[in-house]
Amino acid sequence: MPTPPRSAAEDAVLVERLSADETGEAMRRLYRLFGGELYGFALNALGDRGSAEEIVQEVFLRAWRHAGSYDPGRATVRTWLYQITRHAIIDARRRAAVRPGLPHHDPAEEAEGASLEQAMLGWQVAAALERLTPEHRQMIRMAQFRGLTMREIAEHTGLPLGTVKSRTWYALRSLRLVLEEMGVVPS
Amino acid sequence: MTCARFREELGGHVLGALEPSECDAVAAHLARCPECAAEHERLAGLLPLLARADGLEIPTAPVAVEERLLDRVASEHRGRRTRTSRRWAAASRGRGRALAAAALAGAALGAGVTAFALGGDERPTPGSDYSLVLSGAGGASARAEFAPGREGTEVHLWVKGLPPDGDAVYEVRCERAGWSASAGTFRADARGRAYVVLTTAARLGEYERIRVVRRSDPRDADVLTGEV
């Protein structure tokens, strides 16, 4: 099911509510919106479920404690959370370097930072794909990730070739719009 | 072929999924149509981004982390209130205890209401799976109905007889031994009644009792409880 459309401004309001909200609802909503992709990002970077869970918990606590310093004019909430996660992953890797039992990674931190930036981008694109309709997502997945031609997709899905072509075009246009809305690509 | 028809070929062209003859026709059109060429360029910019997402599936956010996180936030809020309370007590020294206590109540609370209170409306819930009666001290009672959903369980809760404290925030928890999942929070109206619809990530069969607690109570005592 595609994630319902949500604006960056709504996310910013959620962050604004965080520190005063004693009910925990703003935090719960923020976690349910972004927890999955940040967990995927951390899990992919650290390779360990327990460490990834710790990181995600730490990220949202940091966001809660520093919600007042969030500036919607500088970054979307998603980008801000990803940056916090990136820092938390780098910290965790540094700790892992001196703590046995956790996966050890390349200590070349500049390269490490750049590779995390690329990974962050990948997870944000994956999140954008989740916001497309299943039909649009299917077209992109089949053509881009499975390497099928338009004709092969038409045969596979039973859809007319013209429908497959137009659906693929609309899918890419939708993806572009979602990525613009997320601040991943310039509008 | 018109521009409109060529536009529909652009997706397949960008993704390298057209047949060679179709591909040549699109390339020839792009060479003489700046509008279509601009559209093609916008879409082609997605390719390196898509390559980064290959094989990535967004996992479900771990429920256990959500629960730990909300517990931490609640406990840090309690800590903040205690510190605020001490500051207020110091500031109000000499000005009378009653005045300080009244100011504190106003300062400590004011959080947003997370569920809606409709008074005593007790309409049955369409699609609910089973119901439960909860009882508590001081004549408080509640009826809960549960409806399974894709993301967990929807809980409809009708409460009455809560103390008339409009600022009290109550939390509904689905629990079994050693495990707890929050369904969310609510406030009651001036008569101590509430009707709320909450969602918990816990699924039917994963919990054995429902507890309603007052969020600010450090003892975490039951306000209402019922066994499933």
Image (cartoon, coloured by chain):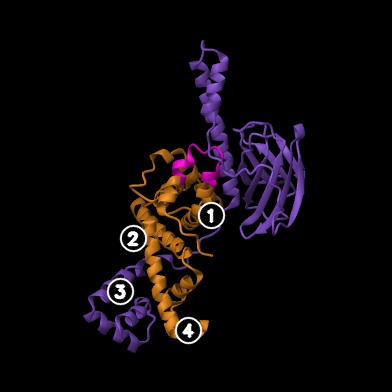
Q: Amino acid at mark 3?
A: His
Between residue A4 and residue A79, name the one nearer to us.
A4
Chain of the residue under the numbered disc 3 shown in the image: B
Q: Is residue B223 left or right of residue A176?
A: right
Mark 2, secondary structure of its residue: loop
The residue labelled by disc 3 is B40
The quarter of the image holding the N terminus of chain A is bottom right
Q: Amino acid at mark 2?
A: Val
Taking the spot 43% from the left edge, 65% from the top edge, the residue there is: B53
Q: Are marks 4 and 2 on the same chain?
A: yes
- Give the numbered dot on residue A48: 1
Question: Residue B36: within the magenta?
Answer: no
- Give the numbered dot on residue A154: 4
Q: Amino acid at mark 1?
A: Asp
Chain of the residue under the numbered disc 2 shown in the image: A
Chain of the residue under the numbered disc 4 shown in the image: A
Upstream in the sequence, badge 4 or badge 1?
1
Principal secondary structure, stretch drawn in magenta: helix
Q: Is residue A66 left or right of residue B224?
A: left
Q: Could you tell me how far apart the alpha carbons at marks 4 and 3 are, in whole angstroms?
A: 22 Å
